[in-house]
Amino acid sequence: MKEISIIIPVYNSQENIEELSRQINDALQDISFEVVFINDGSKDRSWDVLKKLAAGNLNIIAINLRKNFGQDNAIMAGITHASGNYIVIMDDDLQHSPNDIIKLYEQCRQGYDVCYAHFPKKNQQIWKNFGSWLNGVFAYWLLQKPKGIYMSPFKIIKKEVAKSLLQYSGPFPYVDGLILDCTANLTSVTVEHYKRYKGKSNYNLAKSFSVFLKTLTSFSVIPLRLATIIGFISSFTGFIFAVYFMVQYLTTNYTVEGWTSLILTLLIIGGILLMLMGLIGEYIGRMYLALNKKPQFSIGEIIIKEKPTENLNLTDRPEN
């Protein structure tokens, strides 16, 4: 049993892994820990580096997924193999410093279920900051995220809460959404956000949009209720205008003309309808994949260095 398990999804980070492992060892010298690296279908030599590290270190578990399943899916795979009393989740690019793990750990030991890292300033592109802010807004309205909590990818979770996340078996896990479903006993601690150690970021606009869709459709039916409300308002507004123009025509013989206004109205209403149909289709599609048991992840290989077993001395054998 370890005190801390550190789960790190890895994707195309061959240049960062060894330095990350070294910094973790230096930062946690006085505490029992393990590191669970999950190679999420990397296209570079990340898995070769992980195999070498795991083969020579008792504190490292290396998991190789058969293909790229996504960051949250890889995290769920890591949680299934974590044994620590506290489980840390962090990125593989050293923008999250291993030296801050103890800060999160000490804060969580005060009685909180989860402690998030809060970054006053982030060393990343502006559109990523905007995406994080937008995701936080939707999490507040849809998932009842507490005010003042930034849902950072760098966090620590109590073992009991982490294991509760595994009750979710669907193909589209969203770890922060699952956490908010399990507990509201959250806190945060301010730490520094560093520049990426080496290489380029693997996070792009498409992946950010995927996270947005998970927030929007995976853990709340509020968007569907909003769709109903928007549809009702649109229909009611159209009915009021129809009555108004009918009365105006009967009392003044005034005929409403103008193809421009008609086309614009059709475009607006048609756009709203298509958007709402797409939203409903997203829900139905996710339900279809879940019912057909789409796998959350698939593990191809696990490497764990086992502690050598000592030979039993003949003089220590019990007598028959």
Image: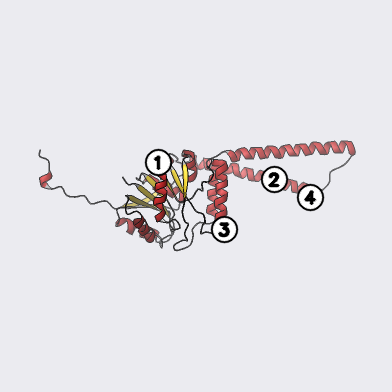
Circle 4 Cα neighbour tier, 10 Å, few/some/many (<14 / 14–19 / ≥20): few
Q: Residue at x 52, y 53 (%)?
A: 207
Q: Residue at x 66, y 38 (%)?
A: 229
Q: Where is residue 41 in the image (x, y as percent from the top left)?
A: 43, 55
Q: Report the quarter where the N terminus lies.
A: top left
Q: Position of residue 303 (x, y in %)?
A: 32, 53
Q: Specify the label residue 260 is tagged with.
A: 4
Q: Which of marks 3 and 4 is in front?
A: 3
Amino acid on which disc 4 is placed: Thr
Q: Residue at x 34, y 56 (%)?
A: 25
Q: Nearer the viewer, mark 1 or mark 2?
A: 1
On the picture, is 240 further left or further right than 141? Answer: right
Q: Specify the label residue 163 is tagged with.
A: 1
Please tell me whether residue 245 is drawn above or below residue 55 in the rendered image: above
Q: Residue at x 41, y 50 (%)?
A: 103
Secondary structure under the numbered disc 4 in the rendered image: helix
Secondary structure under the numbered disc 3 in the rendered image: helix
Q: Specify the label residue 126 is tagged with.
A: 3
Q: Provide the residue designation for mark 2.
A: 270
